[in-house]
Image: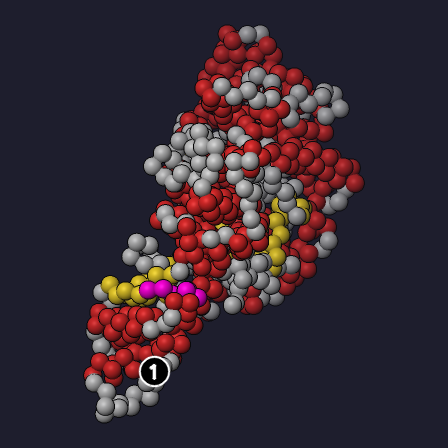
Amino acid sequence: MGDKGDMMGSVVAEVQEELRTFFETKANTNGNENENENEEEVLLGKLCGVVCDVGMKMERSRRLDQGDIAVQLAPVCARVKTNPVHGAKVISEFIMTHLNSLSADERKGKLVQKVACAGPYLNIFLSRPMMYKRVVEQVLEMGARYGFTEAWKGKRVLVEHTSSNPNAPLHIGNLRNVMIGAHTARLIESAGADVKQHFYVNDLGAQIGLTAFGYNRVYNLIKPTMKIDHWIGSMYAIMNTLVELQKVEVDIGKLADACDAGTEGADAFRDGLVAKASGADKKKGIEEYIGIFRELRDREGYEVLFKTVVQEMRDEKDIKKGGAMLNLAYERQDPEAIRIFRKMVIDCLSGVQETLETYNVRHDAFDFESELGWEGSNTAFLDIMKNTSYFVPQTQSNDKGVPEGAYLNMQQFIVDQKLPQGKKGYMKPYPNLYVLRPDGSTLYTFRDIVYSFKKAHQSDLILNVICSEQDLAQQKVSLAMYMMNPELLGRQYHLQYDLVKLKTGKMSGRRGRYLLADDLYAQLKEEIRKKMAQKYEERGDKVSQEFFDQVTHEVSTAAMKYALLACTCSTQISFDIAKITDFEDASAPFILYNSTRLSSLIRKFEGLVEKGVSKDLPDLSQIDWSVVDNHMEWEMLMEFVLGFPSLLKLAACPALPKPPQNPEFGVHKVCDFLNMFTRKLSSYYGPRGVRILPHRSQETITDEQQTALHARIYLCKAFRQVIDNGLDKLFIKPLRKM
């Protein structure tokens, strides 16, 4: 019935059909009354007629002790103008009369076993043996595919994420971008869409040119002393500091010599420059950037690189100009500039990819910003843009007498198109969208528009994972797409997220201050290793070094992923290493530890089979599900196993609103689901839960125990499969031992 993956939908459809056969016997759809019928019978006929005509809205009950499916009867009763409480009573009594009239075999074959009214609601109780059989069979049959639906089947979705600057390593903010993008892609794939993950390589611009300028001068002189992307990021921090020093007229060579002479010499050199400087801003700049220079000079691991870069640049009169000229040559496809840029960019991306592979993330395509210009896309698109009535050309003297770049008059476009402004609409007045500098060169936003059109040709829906600070810029790009082609309205959305904040200080690539993804992973792994070593020691377990290294790696990466995905995108994250590595709190270690207990339980059962204490599992079709009678098991089946496909669908397929509103993908929902499920499981096989395996002292198992054991082992396999599938959406590897 419909989407095979949507089990809850199939259950509801079958319940509707079973009840419909009852209602059709009494339905009065034309409203004519039989003079032999009393008022209650007339009302029942009308209610049954409405139900046959429009159906009843059903959903899984939130209180499974009161019913498995809840039906809100107020809409049905409103159509016949009767009190919904009374209407619910009439309908429930009618259904129960029909159910009680069935033979035992007929009733056993029905999914609906009982109904009861509760105010304006109708609560439906399902056949538990029938539900256990169907759900467990489907979970184990579909395996890793369980949870997949066809909600977005046929839709092509392009998720652009990571897209960090190719002159620096990934920091913790970048890593949140990665996790949100990769997880969203997995979610949407589970809804049947064809999803591609793209990395937009911003290989143009002043900071890239500046880094390449320094990289080219020193690469053949020294060997990298750290991971290549870290080394290139350090290069940028040093080069940027030298540029800032030149802006405040500090001689780099003399500063280097003063620092080599010792602390007193460096202080005296700084104080002398500050005393001679005119203006507070210049004095502040001298103090600030000499301080950064000395900080970088003394930083561990920077010694060789810093000394070499400074030596190469001490006689450069205008370092900024050198970087800009190299950037311009690259943009103009100069072969030597291409060699320099691409070598540096690819080196940096290789280091970034190494970090991404730590977390099992890979992109389908790397799109280079430079190639938009080389292939002629920028020029062709600019010609189209210039022909719109909203394009205002650049000028060397605007009405204020200063040069101004070309822009699109977005406010006029919004007014002409009668787009909403104010609350939930576009801001008013809306700022211009600048696309060209006064000299006619393109701005980054213009190139982003061109790239967006390119993505639109490859997909039906584009999701740009970019921090919330870029919301206005992203909004402008989408609005420009609509201006250029009205069919692209709502084709591109900004999947925004809040930044990750440090508890002290600020991250700054220009100053070489990061909370690096690699460094944080090392901290996490060290903490995980300590805690797991302690657990093994307390349990008296002896494991191989290879096993220990593998497990601690998987748990460490899982802890990072969970921490970055466990809250909504709009929530700001502040890292707490102790919390995210806690085996008892809401964390990946907690989920993995409790999920491995299922595997341990299944292994122990297999051990009983080997010893001859238990019979091996029969075919699933032979299981007697009537013996599974614990309410906790029923709750887990209904809430978590049956509810898993609906959860994924809800997280992956939000409503796509009219711009400028953005959809809200539930990136935190799988984390919440796994946390709640494993907590329930922890209680299930805990001291107050259900005894699944016989007591270790038992040498034989009764037939009754054997029947229940087989059913519960299959049930636990289904539980484990759902948890595995949830972890897979977080690209976390399930562990069988821990």
Q: Is residue 187 left or right of residue 439?
A: left
Query: Which residue is at the front of the view, 708 or 395?
Result: 708
When the figure is inspected, residue 250 is found, relative to residue 732, above or below; the finding is: above
When the figure is inspected, residue 150 is found, relative to residue 99, above or below; the finding is: above
Q: Secondary structure at mark 1?
A: loop
Residue 547 falls in image quadrant: top right
Residue 582 on the magenta segment: no
**Residue 53 x, y percent position in the rendering:** 38, 80
* Residue 22 visible in the shown view: yes
When the figure is inspected, residue 721 is found, relative to residue 64, above or below; the finding is: above
Query: Which residue is at the front of the view, 371 or 698?
Result: 698
Residue 385 falls in image quadrant: bottom right
Residue extending farthest right: 335
Q: Specify few, some or many for label 1: CA neighbours under 10 Å numbering under 14, 14-19, or 20 or more.
A: many
Residue 111 on the magenta segment: yes
Query: Which residue is at the front of the view, 109 or 55?
Result: 109
Q: Callout 1, which amino acid?
A: Ala
Residue extending farthest bottom: 35
**Residue 340 x, y percent position in the rendering:** 74, 35
**Residue 388 x, y percent position in the rendering:** 58, 66
* Residue 246 visible in the shown view: no
Q: Residue at 51% of width from left, 68% of height from top?
A: 1
Location of mark 1 (residue): 27
How is colour applied across the structure in the image? secondary structure
**Residue 4 x, y percent position in the rendering:** 54, 62
Q: Residue at 52% of width from left, 39% of height from top?
A: 614
When the figure is inspected, residue 402 is found, relative to residue 732, above or below; the finding is: below
Q: Residue at 58% of width from left, 35% of height from top?
A: 610
Q: Residue at 45% of width from left, 19% of height from top?
A: 538
**Numbered-mark total:** 1
Give the residues in magenta: 107-114
